[in-house]
Image (tube, rainbow, N blue to C red):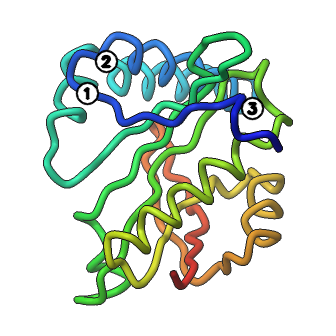
Amino acid sequence: MDTNIITIRQCTSSDWEELLNVSHQTFEDAFKTQTDPINYNAYTSTAFLPEKIKAELAETKSIFFFLIDNTTEQVAGYLKMRWDRSEEFFGTTPAIEIQRIYFYKEFWGKGYGKILLDFAENWGCENNYAFAWLVVWFKNSGAMRFYEREGWETFARKNFQFGSTVHNDYVFRKQL
C-alpha cells in the first residue's frame, strides 16, 4: 500500500468533537446491526458523551491517533492505546493495550486496520513495551482471524459489560 495516501497523527484535546463523532459512528458501523438494540442503546448512551471523550483525551496513561485518508482528506478511523490495565494479564511486565481500532464503514477493506495495527506495535516497541494486547468481541470471527494472521495469539478471556449483558470476550497478545 502506498503510505502517502494516509497520515497518522496524534489527537489533541482540541480534537474531542471529531473523536466523539468518529468513535460513535464507527462503533455503530461495527456493532449496531449485530447486537440487541436495547443493550446497544444502553451502552452507547453513556460511552459517547462529550464529557467522557474529553476525559479520555485528558488521561495521562492513554493516547489516541487519527488515521487520515489523504485522498479524501477525511479521518478514516482511529486508534486508542493505554498502559494502565495490563497487570491483570502481565503482572509487572510492561504491556500496551490496543483498546480501540475502528474505521468508518466506507474505509473498510482498504488495509487501514493493518496499518494502524503495525503502527501500534511499532509505537509499543519504541516505548519499551514487551507485549501488546487487545480484546476482541466473542462474536467477531473476522477480527479474530485478522489478528491471528498478524501473529497474535488468544491467551485469555475477559468480561465486557454491554448494556445488561456480559460478554466473555477473547484476549489476544503479541510479543513486541
Q: Which of marks 3 and 1 is nearer the N terminus?
A: 1
Q: Residue 34 carries which label?
A: 3
Q: Which of marks 3 and 2 is nearer the N terminus?
A: 2
Q: Can residue 63 be seen by looking at this rendering?
A: yes
Within 10 Å of the Cα at label 2, are there few (<14), some (14-19), or many (20+) other Cα atoms?
Answer: some
Q: Where is residue 41 in the image (x, y as percent from the top left)?
A: 50, 19
Pointer 1: what residue? 12
Q: What residue type is labelled 1?
A: Thr
Kindly report the distance in space between the C-alpha atoms of the residues bearing marks 2 and 1.
5 Å
Which residue is depicted at the point 60% across and 13% down? 74
Secondary structure of the residue carrying numbered label 1? loop
Q: Position of residue 104 (x, y in %)?
A: 67, 22
Mark 2 near mark 1, Cβ–Cβ under 8 Å? yes
Which residue is depicted at the point 34% across and 10% down? 17
Q: Which amino acid does label 2 sit on?
A: Asp
The picture quadrant where one finds residue 146 is: bottom right
Q: Which of 31 and 176 is in front in this view?
A: 176
Within 10 Å of the Cα at label 1, are there few (<14), some (14-19), or many (20+) other Cα atoms?
Answer: some
Which residue is depicted at the point 56% across and 19% down? 75
Q: Where is residue 172 in the image (x, y as percent from the top left)?
A: 59, 72
Pointer 2: what residue? 15
- In-image side of 6 versus 86 (left or right): right
Which residue is depicted at the point 76% across and 25% down? 107
Within 10 Å of the Cα at label 3, are there few (<14), some (14-19), or many (20+) other Cα atoms?
Answer: few
Kindly report the distance in space between the C-alpha atoms of the residues bearing marks 3 and 1.
32 Å
